[in-house]
Image (cartoon, grey):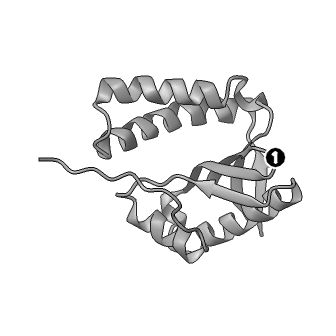
Amino acid sequence: MLAFRKMTSEEFDAYLKGAIGKYVFELVSSGAYNEDDAVNVAHQQFNQLLPRGIGTKDQFLFRVYDCGNRIGMVWYGLRGEEEGFIYDFLIYEPYRGKGYGTRTLELLEKHASQNGIKKIALHVFGHNKKAISLYKKMGYEPYSMHMSKEF
C-alpha cells in the first residue's frame, strides 16, 4: 500500500543537496541559464521556499513508500489559501513505468484536499516529456507557457 512519510531532518539534508544539483541541471538543460547563474538561482529559490528547512510552515516534504520500500519523494506547499504547488516529485528509476507516479499524485491530491487545498499546480520543464505525459493523463492542463528560440 502506498504511503507518505514525513522526511526526517537527516533525510531533508541529503535531499536538499541532491535537489539543488538536479535543479541546476534542469535550469542549464532548459537553456535558460549558464551553470554559474543556475547555481545562484537554485540556491536563492530553495532558500526562499524553505527558509526554515523541513520546519517551514505550509511545506510538505514526504518520502513515498510501497510495502516498506522507499520508491520516491514528493514536496508540495501551500500557495494562497486554497492552492497548492508541487515543487518536486520523483519516482526512483527501478519503480518507474509501474503506475507509481499516478498513484503518488492521487495520494498527494487526497492529502492536499484534506488540508483545504482545492487546486494544485506545478512546473515542468518542456524537455521532460514523460512527466508532461503523466501530468496530462492525470488531468493537469497548461495555463502558461514560456517559449524561446535560439538563432
| Position in image of residue 78 (x %, y %) | 75, 44
The residue nearer to you, when weighing 73 against 41, is: 41
In this picture, is 91 found above or below 96? above
Q: Is residue 57 above or below residue 51?
A: below
Report the side of 72 relative to 117 (left or right). left
Q: Which element type, helix, strand or loop, lies under badge 1?
A: loop
Against 101, residue 123 (above or below) is above
Q: x, y percentage for residue 142?
A: 51, 64
Residue 91 spot, x, y in % from top left: 56, 59
Q: Which residue has dot 1 on it?
A: 81
Left or right of 51 in this view: 145 = left
Q: Residue at x 78, y 50 (%)?
A: 5
Q: Quadrant of the N terminus?
A: bottom right
- At 73% from the left edge and 23% from the top edge, which residue is drawn? 52
Residue 33, compared with residue 88, is above or below; it is: above
Instruction: State the residue in front, 150 or 29.
Output: 150
Q: Residues within 10 Å of mark 1 (few under 14, many from 20)?
A: few
The amino acid type, in three-letter code, at marker 1 is Glu
What residue lies at 30% left-to-right and 45% top-to-bottom? 29
Percent across and percent down for residue 39 are 40, 26
Q: Nearer the viewer, residue 69 or 96?
A: 96
Instruction: Say left or right for 109 vs 25.
Output: right
Camera-nearest residue between 25 and 97: 25
Residue reaching furthest to the left: 151
Which residue occupies the extreme front position in the image?
144
Q: Quadrant of residue 11?
A: top right
Q: Quadrant of residue 141?
A: bottom right
